[in-house]
């Protein structure tokens, strides 16, 4: 038997901070966790990794506002032959993923389709015959 079982005393767990239930409470909690103003934000930036360069100085102001070089340059488009070859490779890769039916499955599927088509042709012919008789009877 352990001490906690024998004495009947339970160790108290540290109290957890509950999550805010309402959106207003969440906004208030976020606002209290954030530094207020630019001066406070600059002070916290110094403590973040990567906020300053290796010698401790801030990044030069002239680099701000410019697009990164990756956005400035355009990507080269592959040639027509290269794009066609890529297309063929991707089509072949997709065809390898297809689960091809066996011969018995193909015979079964073909039979089902032919029977269904024959049924639909007979149904359309029957409806056409009924409407034709009805129109001749009505307008005679």
Image: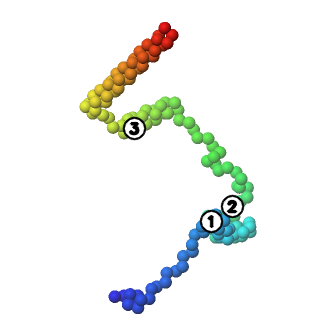
Query: Residue shown at 46%/15% (left/top)?
Result: 134
View extreme (bottom): residue: 7
View extreme (top): residue: 140
Q: Is residue 125 above or below residue 40?
A: above
Q: Is residue 70 above or below residue 25?
A: above
Residue 71 picture location, percent across and down: 63, 46
Whether pointer 2 and pointer 1 mark residues with C-beta atoms closer than 8 Å, the reply is no
Residue 59 picture location, percent across and down: 69, 61
Residue 21 picture location, percent across and down: 60, 67
Answer few, some or many: residues within 10 Å of disc 3's Cα (few below 14, many 20 plus, some between 14 and 19). few
User: Which SS class for mark 1?
Assistant: loop
How far is mark 3 from mark 1, CA to CA?
51 Å
Residue 54 as seen in the image, left or right of residue 105: right
Q: Is residue 100 above or below residue 60?
A: above
Answer few, some or many: residues within 10 Å of disc 2's Cα (few below 14, many 20 plus, some between 14 and 19). few
Q: Earlier in the sequence, mark 3 or mark 1?
A: 1
How far is mark 3 from mark 2, CA to CA?
48 Å
Q: How is the image coloured?
A: rainbow
User: Which SS class for mark 2?
Assistant: loop
How far is mark 2 from mark 1, CA to CA?
40 Å
Question: Mark on residue 22?
Answer: 1
Whether pointer 3 and pointer 1 mark residues with C-beta atoms closer than 8 Å, the reply is no
Find disc 2 in the rendering and name its residue: 59
Q: Quadrant of the N terminus?
A: bottom left
Query: Residue shown at 57%/74% (left/top)?
Result: 17
| Residue mark closest to the camera, 3 vs 1 | 1
| Residue mark closest to the camera, 3 vs 2 | 3
Question: Mark on residue 93?
Answer: 3
User: Which SS class for mark 3?
Assistant: helix
Q: Earlier in the sequence, mark 2 or mark 1?
A: 1
Residue 125 as seen in the image, left or right of residue 111: right
Can residue 36 be seen here? The reply is: yes
């Amino acid at each position: 038997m352990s001490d906690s079982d024998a004495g009947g005393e339970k160790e108290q767990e540290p109290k957890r901070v509950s999550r805010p239930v309402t959106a207003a409470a969440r906004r208030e909690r976020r606002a209290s966790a954030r530094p207020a103003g630019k001066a406070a934000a600059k002070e916290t930036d110094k403590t973040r990794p990567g906020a300053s360069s290796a010698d401790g100085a801030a990044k030069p102001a002239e680099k701000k506002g410019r697009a990164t070089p990756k956005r400035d340059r355009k990507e080269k488009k592959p040639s027509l032959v290269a794009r066609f070859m890529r297309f063929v490779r991707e089509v072949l890769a997709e065809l390898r993923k297809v689960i091809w039916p066996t011969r018995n499955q193909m015979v079964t599927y073909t039979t089902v389709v032919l029977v269904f088509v024959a049924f639909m042709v007979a149904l359309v012919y029957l409806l056409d015959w009924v409407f034709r008789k009805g129109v001749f009877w009505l307008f005679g």
